[in-house]
Amino acid sequence: MAGHPEWITDPRFLTNVLRVENMDALKELIEGWTQSYTVNEIVDKALGAGVPAGL
């Protein structure tokens, strides 16, 4: 969905525990990605990937 398949294999985010421990880094990546799109585009991308989303 985000166009960053490397995030899936990033050792900082492999498990939920690691994602929580590295929340600041994950949040920074996601915030950077979202700045490239409108809210509607993000919702469309999420829905297209099967992720519940809405306005």
Image (tube, rainbow, N blue to C red):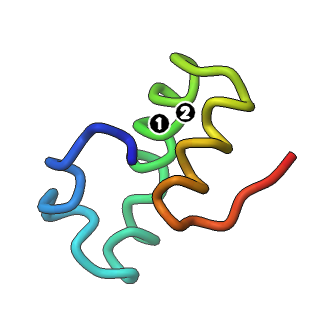
**Residue 23: percent from the left, percent from the top?**
47, 58
Q: Is residue 37 above or below residue 33?
A: above
Q: Is residue 4 left or right of residue 33?
A: left
**Residue 24: percent from the left, percent from the top?**
48, 48
Residue at the far right: name it.
55
Which residue is the site of mark 1? Answer: 28
**Residue 31: percent from the left, percent from the top?**
54, 33
User: Which residue is at the front of the view, 3 or 18?
Assistant: 3
Q: Is residue 19 above or below residue 37?
A: below
Specify the amino acid type for callout 1: Glu
Kindly report the distance in space between the C-alpha atoms of the residues bearing marks 1 and 2: 5 Å
Q: Is residue 1 above or below residue 29?
A: below
User: Which residue is at the front of the view, 17 or 33?
Assistant: 33
Specify the amino acid type for callout 2: Glu
Q: Is residue 52 left or right of residue 10?
A: right
Residue 8: numbered disc? none
The total number of labels drawn is 2
At horizontal 73% and vertical 30% (from top left) the residue drawn is 39
| Mark 1–mark 2 CB contact (< 8 Å) | yes
Looking at the rendering, which quadrant does residue 21 occupy? Answer: bottom left
Q: Is residue 15 above or below residue 7?
A: below
**Residue 25: percent from the left, percent from the top?**
39, 45
Mark 2 packing: few (<14 Cα in 10 Å), some, or many (20+)?
few
Q: Is residue 10 left or right of residue 15?
A: left
Mark 1 packing: few (<14 Cα in 10 Å), some, or many (20+)?
few
Which residue is the site of mark 2? Answer: 31
User: Which residue is at the front of the view, 11 or 35?
Assistant: 35
